[in-house]
Image (spheres, rainbow, N blue to C red):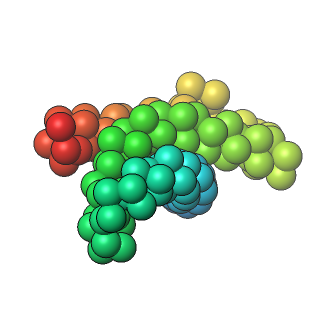
Amino acid sequence: MYNLRAMASIDKYIIKKLFISLVIVCIAMLSLAWLTQVLRMLDEAIIRGASIPVFLSLTISVMPNILAQILPLALFISTVFVLNNMGKDNESIIILSSGISNFRTLKPFLIFATITSILLLILSLYLAPA
């Protein structure tokens, strides 16, 4: 019988690595997307004579929509990054040699993807401006 405490610690470890990499990838992609939005809207703001606070609030108001578009790709990139690092650091070999199957190793990835999907659904339906 497997040690359930060890399983939970492996799940927490993988989810923590996924969360950290997802935050880093989201910040990087959101920064690039925000910069392109600012550069695109800057000409229009100068022509209309918008003040800096109005301009910044306008560019920040589109961030939830951009995040809703970026989050699935960021989740994929962070999952590939974590799996690649686990393979590179031989963590996956250690997990497999301890008797945990490949399908059992997928559990934290599926849990994290489900939580991210629910958050994305809430973001898209309720938080993002129309």
Q: Residue at x 54, y 34 (%)?
A: 73
Image coordinates of residue 41 in percent, x first then y, are 43, 51
Most foreground residue, 23 or 99: 23
Q: Give me the residue at 40% from left, 51% from top.
A: 44
Name the residue: 47% across, 56% down. Answer: 42
Q: How many marks?
A: 0
Q: Residue furthest left?
A: 126
Q: Position of residue 62 (x, y in %)?
A: 33, 49
Residue that appears at 47% across and 34% down = 72
Question: Does the rendering let one see residue 22?
Answer: no
**Nearer the observer, 7 or 14:** 14
Q: Decide which of 49, 58 is in the foreground and name it.
A: 49
> Quadrant of the rendered structure where residue 101 is?
top right
Location of the C terminus by quadrant is top left
- Residue 39 placed where, x, y %? 54, 53
Residue 78 seen in this snapshot? yes
In the drawing, does residue 118 fall left or right of residue 63? Answer: left
Where residue 26 sits in the image (x, y, percent)?
52, 52
Task: Using residue 127 as the reference point, say whether residue 92 is left or right of it.
Answer: right
Residue extending farthest top: 103
Q: Can you say whether 41 is above or below 57 in the image?
A: above
Q: Is residue 111 left or right of residue 104?
A: left
